[in-house]
Amino acid sequence: MAIATINPATGETLKTFEPLNDTEIAAKLDLAGETYHQYRHTSFQERSLKLTKAAEILEQEKADFANLMTLEMGKTKKSAIAEVEKCAAVCRYYAEHAANFLADIYVKTDASHSCVKYQPLGVILAVMPWNFPFWQVFRFAAPALMAGNVGLLKHASNVPQCALAIEDIIHRAGFPQGAFQTLLIGAAKVANLMADDRIKAATLTGSEPAGASLAQAAGKQIKKVVLELGGSDPFIVLESADIEAAVATATTARMLNNGQSCIAAKRFIVIEAIADKFEKLLLEKFIALKVGDPMLPETDLGPLATPDILQDLDQQVQTAVNSGGKILTGGQPLSGSGNFYPATIIRDVPQDSAIAKDEFFGPVALLFRVPDIDAAIKLANDSPFGLGASAWTANAEEKQRLIEEIEAGGVFINGMVKSDPRLPFGGIKRSGYGRELSIQGIHEFVNVKTVWVK
Ligand code: NAP
């Protein structure tokens, strides 16, 4: 894929970038390696001051950064602003808590002194997606830098200006040049990077094929990897639920980021007794959404990020219909320029069909009806993915069953699945492994060193 800014709302190519050649890549690796040996000895206090400065830059210039995201990948300007604010929050969170999370833990043994020590690993490669171009990077960079690691970013090829802006923010915050560098390179270069001795570990957020490819390259070198991959999160509505609240949240949860979020609710599983009401209210909400220019404040649903994503989604919808699904609204790409797809609801897709298990990466909701909670949990778990799950009920016993029995990295009762710096984030099954955020996130890229002294 060319490294370029192409406005998804118009299809216009605004800027193209020459990928780095091998000599340029080698120079950045050298700088990262050299910087690590100095940077790892900086104090938590020093790192924390710099990360707080990064938060200030993000807050002060959030309108500019939000514009860049909207321009490159089409998310609505209002959601882009919220994303920049969240990046500032994750910087402040780790600036405040990292020293505590990585403090030595003393353990009483037969030694005169024994403890667990957390030490940085070195240069970490981050392969990141375009869908949250700032958030995905900062949620990696903030804990990695606080732990004393240095980062190399291979961002998605369609958000190069976001990638360069992030590098600039981190440098302006006072981190050394080599502590965080953007590599403008294509995906084909990643496997070779994993073979380089200077890179000690990697994290990838993206599709299953990309994750599998990185894990394979890392496996050959015995290097640690964290993978945050796709999801087809269930959104379960049981009979006692507050249906109006569930429908309002269902709409937000499906349309988040123009439907292109790993943790968007994708499969709506509703108890038969309340399904007609849920369906009618959801339809009203979807029809009322305003599709259009993502820069305008009144827009609810902007374009998809690339023509390929639009084409893939269109193909999936056609497959769903050919498998027996019925379109309640939407179902066809919008005519005109830009990658616009309308809010779409499909019901009656056979629950055991292959397409029912696919990830729909766009504003398409699959609606399933089930007789009871047993069937709801069974269908929720009948997925290759296990990222998040949202479930709605007022019944205490049902809440407990949902928490215990749903197979996912996170279960949210009476609320939508979301990431929060204070809580770990990640998946099971084909959604990946490892965790980001919270104390678990900062522990992924450290050497847990046992110390025993007699
Ligand atoms: P993608 O094609 O996998 O791209 C993600 C990143 O991986 C990009 O930087 C891409 O580079 C790179 N890449 C692609 N193929 C690669 C390979 N074979 N080896 C190494 N790197 C490779 O993903 P996407 O389609 O843009 O993103 C959507 C997917 O990401 C969805 O499945 C979504 O659910 C998932 N996602 C997951 C999370 C999570 O936290 N679990 C969050 C957001 C998104 P190029 O751009 O140069 O191809």
Image: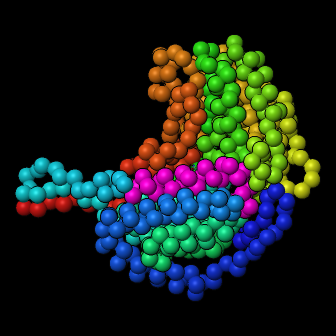
Q: Residue furthest front?
A: 60
Which region shows up in magenta?
69-95
Tell me, yes or no, whether the highlighted magenta stretch contains residue 454. Answer: no
Q: Residue at x 62, y 15 (%)?
A: 239
Residue 167 lies, with reference to residue 423, above or below; the image says: below
Between 187 and 294, the one lying in front of the other is 294
Residue 237 lies, with reference to residue 167, above or below; the image says: above
The image quadrant where one finds the C terminus is bottom left
Q: Residue at x 22, y 52 (%)?
A: 105
Q: Main secondary structure of the magenta part?
A: helix
In-image side of 158 versus 318 (left or right): left
Q: Is residue 205 visible?
A: no
The image quadrant where one finds the N terminus is bottom right
Residue 19 lies, with reference to residue 44, above or below; the image says: below
Residue 31 lies, with reference to residue 400, above or below; the image says: below
In-image side of 174 versus 137 (left or right): left
